[in-house]
Image (cartoon, grey):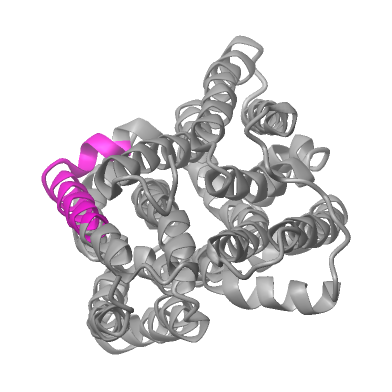
Amino acid sequence: MNFLTSKIRPMYFKYLAAAFGSALIASIYGVVDMAMVGQYQGPDGTAALAVVAPIWNIIYSLGLLMGIGGSVLFSTMKGRADSNKEKPNEYFTAAMIGGAVFAVLSWVGVAFFDRELLLLFGADEGLLPLAQRYLLPVKFAVPSFLFVQLIAAFLRNDGNPALATKAVLFGGVLNVFGDYFFVFSLNMGIFGAGLATVLGSVLSLLVMLTHFMSARNTLRFVKPQKLLFILRQICITGFSTFFIDVAMGILTVFFNRQILKYLGTDALAVYGVIINISTFVQCCAYSIGQASQPIVSTNFGARQGDRIRSTLKYALATAAVFGIVWTVLIEFAPMSFVRIFMTPTENITAIAPHILKCYGLSFLLLPLNIFSTYYFQALMQPVTSFVVSVSRGAVISGILIYLLPAVAGGEMIWFTMPITELIVAVFVIYKMIQFTKNLPKT
């Protein structure tokens, strides 16, 4: 399919299916780990993985920073008639170089400072040994997780989204069966869950690398002109997507600390369930952004405004469907989700439905707000995308996490994200109307 000439509807839904499958399967890593560990080791295992979650957020977000930032510029340059033929691959090469640097830094952090990181992210002396045991095999494969995110973004922009989905599918299947085999059959417990996750990620990366041997590949390494300038452009363009995942890690730390302070370990275990449900909802939102971004970026470079508007129409409809479906599921069947991730105690059975129903209201607007960051990036509006990401991921949500419990009691912490998403959505809708109205007529 050609981003500039193919019909928008079939092209968008083809990319949506591939992106949705890829994003959904990718979320299996954490979800299956949480479910298996929760069943094997109970609420403490679930709480331990909630503490590990920010580390995943940081690693994945660095991959997205280089992957989304580089691939947006890659597609924009391909859409411009006046662009140098080598220019798109300068952004690919620079993104890979930046990814390698971040991979090394992440590797060092996880390998040598895991204890300090886990304590920072909310672990206590009871949860720390479990969290460290899970991370032990991860220490040997940190770069793999980062490059899966980075390369997948370029595959979608190089016309091969199906391979990204296939790669994550193979890795996800290996992770599922590996979790059961290592955790239960070999009685490895939480260590086995970490090992299965590593093997799944490595397999996904190996499958993605086959794209570079295919005839349809246009990605190749070239010598970037002004490497530091290009890396700066990539970082600015990709920062919003990067910050979405980083913010999830930051918010997890804030929530972990405040929940332990006001509500205790059982509430933290329930929050571990929420983290995994939120991962699924965010994956749905990512898939909308990842499906529309290559189309919007390329047509923005070619000044094809009407094609961008058509893509936006389908993206907004998809965001509405995802938001409604997830909100209904969480409101009417909260305990079904809890039982997936753990064998609930009597106390957890008593507190979980209220917690999930309150927090789950945020899922109605979450897909719209996250998709908007991809849309603004594709329109080369990184400042607006930055404002959305930072507002929902740190500023508004961060203030409410500390303000609501202090003013109205600990239970009010669960309304932090519904209020945040509502405030951000008002700004998002206003800016979407403004920027879309100013697109050139075809």
Q: Position of residue 401 (x, y in %)?
A: 39, 79
Residue 274 among those drawn in magenta: no
Which of the 4 quarters of the picture holds residue 180?
Answer: top right
Q: Where is residue 294 in the image (x, y as percent from the top left)?
A: 47, 55
Q: Does residue 158 lie above or below 314 as drawn?
A: above
Q: Position of residue 415 (x, y in %)?
A: 25, 72
Magenta span dominant secondary structure: helix
Q: Give the range drawn in magenta.
A: 314-338
Name the quarter where the C terminus is drawn: bottom left
Which of the 4 quarters of the picture holds residue 357?
Answer: bottom left
Q: Is residue 89 left or right of residue 40?
A: right
Question: How many numbered tags mark residues here?
Answer: 0
Name the quarter where the N terminus is drawn: top left
Q: Does residue 399 lie above or below 287 as drawn?
A: below
Q: Does residue 138 lie above or below 81 as drawn?
A: above
Q: Which of 208 and 89 is in front in this view?
A: 89
